Amino acid sequence: MGGYILAIDQGTTSTRAIVFDGNQKIAGVGQKEFKQHFPKSGWVEHDPEEIWQTVVSTVKEAIEKSGITANDIAAIGITNQRETVVVWDRETGKPIHNAIVWQDRRTAAFCDKLKKKGLEKTFVKKTGLLLDPYFSGTKLNWLLSNVKGAQARAAKGELCFGTIDTFLIWRLTGGKCFCTDATNASRTLLYNIAENAWDDELTEILRVPKEMLPEVKDCAADFGVTDPSLFGAAIPILGVAGDQQAATIGQACFKPGMLKSTYGTGCFALLNTGKDMVRSKNRLLTTIAYRLDGETTYALEGSIFVAGAAVQWLRDGLKVIKAAPDTGSLAESADPSQEVYLVPAFTGLGAPHWDPDARGAIFGMTRNTGPAEFARAALEAVCYQTRDLLEAMHKDWRRNGNDTVLRVDGGMVASDWTMQRLSDLLDAPVDRPVILETTALGVAWLAGSRAGVWPNQEAFAKSWARDRRFEPHMDEATRKVKLKGWRSAVKRTLIAA
């Protein structure tokens, strides 16, 4: 067994497998996109079998590109799109329906029904989450209610529920390990984050039989070993964390007050609050950042549903760019006299608004508005939304003051223009790390440290390296005008909804 670690990063639009060597450097990568299914307006699904095939193929590709064999891999870490739901047959391992994706809004009416019964306070108190279609529990309720015979079969123990990590662990271990980690469990609306246990009252409200729920483990734990027939050796799975928590770990945000924001399909900012389970008064989420050796570290989280997806919309919907990297240079050429605002509520608005019925809107267009202004508006929308999250975090947790340094990762942070505008609108420094694959790095560290081939937490934190710091240059008067325009645009969007 060598010192290599394999990270499986199962995302919303693609699956990546990354092999890291003993020095935490990338040795090989495999990546494959998969199909997005939109059966109805606001519905988003994935084929679990296709996801599984992309995992197997990308792992093999990454191992081959690394020039190693499975015997050289000390451990596997898995990170995943968190709230996406799969239900499968316990005997055959076959899903009973497509996976319902975190972006899916089909349960909005059910969430409203629960709110009208006065149940949101119960969910917030126990889970730290709001009643929103974003989370797993109402999606699971929909599957049990709408797939013929599912409710009865689940009660008999014939069905298994899991987020993507659980489904992959089950498949990788040949059905021998049915488990998840605390971070993924904390996103289901079924898990009591204070008691670290599935909650009887919540499972009863959502009509979820506890027989179908997986065992919940620490983020660094024994999650079984892979079937040797898959990759040529039995490899232990020793690390699991939802993608945003994995990025928090990969960014070495281990101290209370440290903050990271990931810019992928959506944008997710997490503020480490240590052992303090901070109850937000500004509609942020209280969640588990990670659980190690039985000790839980909490975080405040702000969730933005559309970040990189807005750039994809420019490319695939409007066709004003040919490739995502073109956006920054196009935005730079925009007319500075035009203030165009895009409120990218394509699937509703997340924190701090939580309006699932809001839809996208553009404000400030003139006859001279063109592709450059649209590009700038799309990139600035991400920055404005991040500003909204940071303001809410500072109101909820003043211990950090306002001297925030934001560590960033994800595909969008490669754009210097976007990161500079982010710093300008936040009026705060933005640090971009040398290793941008922080999500994969986070679970690689969980697995590698558990296997004893990677450094401990303190040494790993010291190894974090900054590529560049972006400092704010925008004058205060300009910032105020732009922020005022953004708030007006959001307000009008919410009123329209």
Image (cartoon, helix red, strand yellow):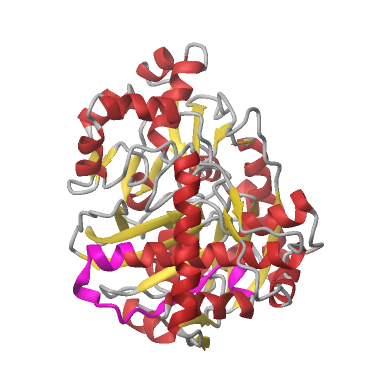
Where does the image place residue 150, in percent across and percent down from the top left?
Answer: 46, 17
Report the side of 130 relative to 424 (left or right).
Answer: left
Where does the image place residue 340, in percent across and percent down from the top left?
Answer: 62, 63
**Residue 291 sits inside the magenta stretch:** no
**Where is 30 relative to 476, above or below?**
above
- Report how many numbered discs are placed on residues in the image: 0
Along the line of sight, the residue nearer the viewer: 33 or 271? 271
**Where is 373 relative to 407, above or below?**
above
Q: Is residue 242 visible?
A: no
Q: Is residue 360 visible?
A: yes
Kindly identify the residue that appears in the image at 58 percent across and 28 percent down. 94
Report the side of 453 relative to 434 (left or right).
Answer: left
Where does the image place residue 246, in percent across and percent down from the top left?
Answer: 44, 62
Along the line of sight, the residue nearer the viewer: 170 or 182? 182
Report the side of 68 relative to 272 (left or right).
Answer: right
**Where is 23 relative to 167, above or below?**
below
Residue range of the region highlighted in magenta in the rendering: 392-414
Kindly identify the residue that appears in the image at 54 percent across and 47 percent down. 345
Kindly identify the residue that appears in the image at 39 percent across and 52 percent down. 351
Kindly identify the residue that appears in the image at 70 percent across and 52 percent down. 313
Along the line of sight, the residue nearer the viewer: 87 or 255? 255
Where does the image place residue 21, in percent across and percent down from the top left?
Answer: 57, 76
Residue 390 found in image quarter:
bottom left
Residue 152 found in image quarter:
top left
Along the line of sight, the residue nearer the viewer: 238 or 387? 387
**Residue 412 sits inside the magenta stretch:** yes
Residue 233 found in image quarter:
bottom right
**Where is 230 relative to 289, above or below?**
above
